[in-house]
Amino acid sequence: MIERPQPTEVAPYYFTYINQVIGDDPIAVIENQLAESQVLFSEISEEKSLHRYAPEKWSIRQVLNHVTDTERAFAFRALWFARGFDTPLPSYDQNVAATGAEANHVSWAAHVEEFRGVRLSTISLFRNLPPQAWMRSGIASGNPFTVRAVAYIIPGHLAHHISLLRERYLSIKPAAKRRKNAAHGVNRG
């Protein structure tokens, strides 16, 4: 059990992600998400992975690349703070990373495999932390972070983007919305 982060452990914005994680075992969530995401990703073809739901939005490939790169950045933050480094870390600009990645030139299969490798690395990092490391903290992007807050941000960030993929890119509504629409006689997918 890894208690949920308190408001003083991270900037309020990050609770957008932390609050998407159910329970008090972010490692189990991270592990479960790996299997669940692989099923979803296997249903997306190479062609479909280039889809954007609007002209100015990222393609599915770019979304998964963003998730993978962001997980790398946050896992590095967790490592940095857990090992006791006290030098503040710089900001991570997702738009700079997205432009530099040229994700649409990398196959969907390669993106899926890359995410899997990064996620396995993240799992190993968190599984092997000593107990005292979870409350170590540091500064990144001018904001405080504890290691345990980062452990909740990572799966929350993936959950956020999986939800967007399902609803906006793949037109899969969450079960609760489907039930609500059915109760009101609405059939929207």
Image: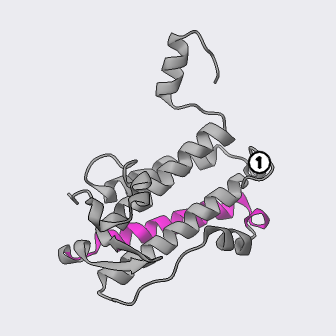
Q: Where residue 17 sits: x, y (%)?
A: 43, 54
- Picture residue at 55% right of the left edge, 74% below the top: 92
Q: Main secondary structure of the magenta part?
A: helix
Q: Which residue is mark 1?
A: 51
Q: Is residue 12 magenta?
A: no
Q: Residue at x 36, y 59 (%)?
A: 152
Quarter assignment of residue 146: bottom left
Helix, strand, or loop for circle 1?
A: loop
Write the start and end of the magenta stretch as one range. Answer: 103-130
Q: Tell me: 61 left or right of 174.
A: right
Residue at (62% x, 48% y) in the render = 42
Task: Identify the image's colour scheme: rainbow, by chain, secondary structure or one colour.
Answer: one colour
Residue type marked 1: His
Residue 18 image position (x, y, % from top left): 37, 54
Residue 124 on the magenta segment:
yes
Q: Count the marks: how many?
A: 1
Percent position (x, y) of residue 116? 53, 63
Query: Which picture quadrant has residue 170?
Result: top right
Asked if residue 129 is positioned above or below residue 157 in the image, the reply reads: below
Residue 103 vertical position relative to residue 21 in the rendered view, above or below: below
Give the answer, above or below, for where 5 lies relative to 44. Answer: below
Residue 154 point in image, percent of width and height: 43, 61
32, 165: nearer the viewer = 165
